[in-house]
Amino acid sequence: MTSPRRVVLLAGGFGGARMAHGFALLGDAVDLTVIGNTGDDIELHGLHISPDLDTVMYTLAGMANERTGWGVRDETWSAAEMLARYGQPTWFSLGDRDLATHITRSSRLAAGARLTTVTAELARALGVRAALLPMSDDPVRTKVRTAQGWLDFQDYFVRRGHADDVLELRFEGIERALPSAEVVRSLEAADVIVIAPSNPFVSVAPIVGLPGMIEALGRQPAPVVAVSPIVGGAALRGPAAAMMGSVAKQPPTSAGVAAHYAVTWPGLVDVLVIDAADAAEAAAVAATGIEPLVTRTVIGQVEDRRRLAEELLRLGR
Amino acid sequence: MTSPRRVVLLAGGFGGARMAHGFALLGDAVDLTVIGNTGDDIELHGLHISPDLDTVMYTLAGMANERTGWGVRDETWSAAEMLARYGQPTWFSLGDRDLATHITRSSRLAAGARLTTVTAELARALGVRAALLPMSDDPVRTKVRTAQGWLDFQDYFVRRGHADDVLELRFEGIERALPSAEVVRSLEAADVIVIAPSNPFVSVAPIVGLPGMIEALGRQPAPVVAVSPIVGGAALRGPAAAMMGSVAKQPPTSAGVAAHYAVTWPGLVDVLVIDAADAAEAAAVAATGIEPLVTRTVIGQVEDRRRLAEELLRLGR
């Protein structure tokens, strides 16, 4: 019997959850740690909401609403109806089950618990075996500059349906935020570090951009393998393709993703996994100094998630 | 057209809500202000819950669960199920719609709003025409001494099902609490002040016991009419009858209620309304210096609520 391979996954919500699910499906062969983006976190109705962590958690707990890509399956909406009657903002949909997560999180945080502790408690209670870590216990809030000026991330993303061109991004508080001790330790022990097929600008960048994070990633001996979130010139979901042009001045292609990673964090990414549909871009990826791996990266189906996770595991030390 | 009669009702939850409903049914003939007990308030899951105010509010909004006597009709319980999975305390039932009330209240309080303001906002949003006032914006918390020692009120009442003998009561914080300006103004303008058929010890006493309250009640010219919560030697609901003996050393009768009010707040109550079933106690009530009014006080049915309200209105100035 071999000991489990230690996989650390840097994850946003949608793509991060699916990739995490793939590794979780490998059972005892993998010791999975997910480092989740908290730049998307929002305070609403006095509650602390961590959308990316929750999407990963619900997915790993087998409770996710796979159709919408967020929230809980078989959800009810009674509280939301009442919140609307009370004139509370309703643009950020909060189901009743989901609300219990935010209530519990907020109540524990108010009692002085770290977000890392609370996240672990919530995940454990739902039967999640993977270690789910917020990237930091310190607040980081992604802000998006558009023609409307600077917007809160969820205001841009949910309220306005990410319809605005994004001109600039900043991560408020990041210079005072630190990766948690648990995050640093997980990286030190990793056999492979995977950057999920999440948005490089708003999901991956807040994590990698934490003070000390790039050094911690550089210090550890495991290969860093990124999965491109772009397939056939489009993002599987969300505004990643549009941001490739407006933020990174790169084409919305996997080669563009490689170039963006190579320019932004030189030497960080060892391998970029790109979809077979983009096989023609392999040489362009290699030209950035990042090794391409061509396979199928569309992982809506459970069997595809597992297969991709197995392929990534083979790249580990 | 005559101007509306200004009725001020001092109310707990169950009996207070039914009596308030009776006055509300009289429509434009009545300008109703309900002063609600907040000694039963509780902080749970980081949320501020005002059970007595909410029971009155939901009843006046036509949303109350009349079967249970608390909470909202056609309620769902998804959040409660999840809170249980998270290991949160579940002895205080919180339905999904009800939860939205507590979330909104807590979020507004955290933003610096007074409980008086928030309560008015919530009630207005649900279409309640009466003025619903918490007795104070300052925290008062009812504590109950039993053989188990001092318990928080809801711990005694809900968690332990008011099964313990109550030896003593105190209202933590009451000496530093003040009736709000709105409460004082409503008393000054009242044509009749009604003490609802609520528990004299845990619903009425925290209101009347506020510093300055007994003076404010004495100053105003309207008659004070109390409705006995005891019928045929038993409380219509809850532990009032048991407390008559253990707290007030009075028999669990309407005459006992009269004696308790006469001893505790001499001269406060002008009239005690007792049920026809207790007609034989009228002389004993009169002997306390409080004028008895014998009628039907069981007001489970809507038509009885309206009729009793009409009878009380005739006692006003």
Image (tube, coloured by chain):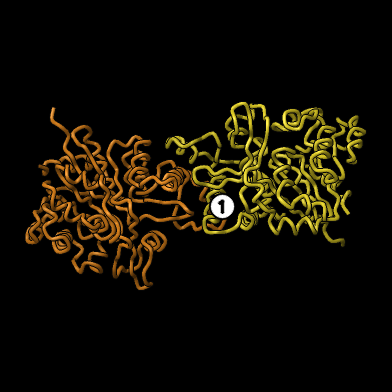
Chain colours: A yellow, B orange
Residue B11 relative to residue B160: left or right: left
Q: Residue at the location (77% across, 36% down)?
A: A229
Q: How many marks?
A: 1
| Residue pointed to by mark 1 | A105
- Residue A63 visible somewhere in the drawing: no
Question: Looking at the figure, which quarter contains the N terminus of chain A?
Answer: bottom right
Q: Position of residue B104 (x, y in %)?
A: 44, 43
Task: Name the residue type under label 1.
Answer: Arg
Q: Residue at the location (52% across, 39% down)?
A: A77
Residue A204 relative to residue A263: left or right: left
Residue B204 relative to residue A57: left or right: left
Question: Residue A59 lies in what quarter of the image?
Answer: top right
Between residues A287 and B98, which one lies in front from this camera angle? A287
Between residues B39 and B181, which one lies in front from this camera angle? B181
Circle 1: element type: helix
Between residues B261 and A291, which one lies in front from this camera angle? A291
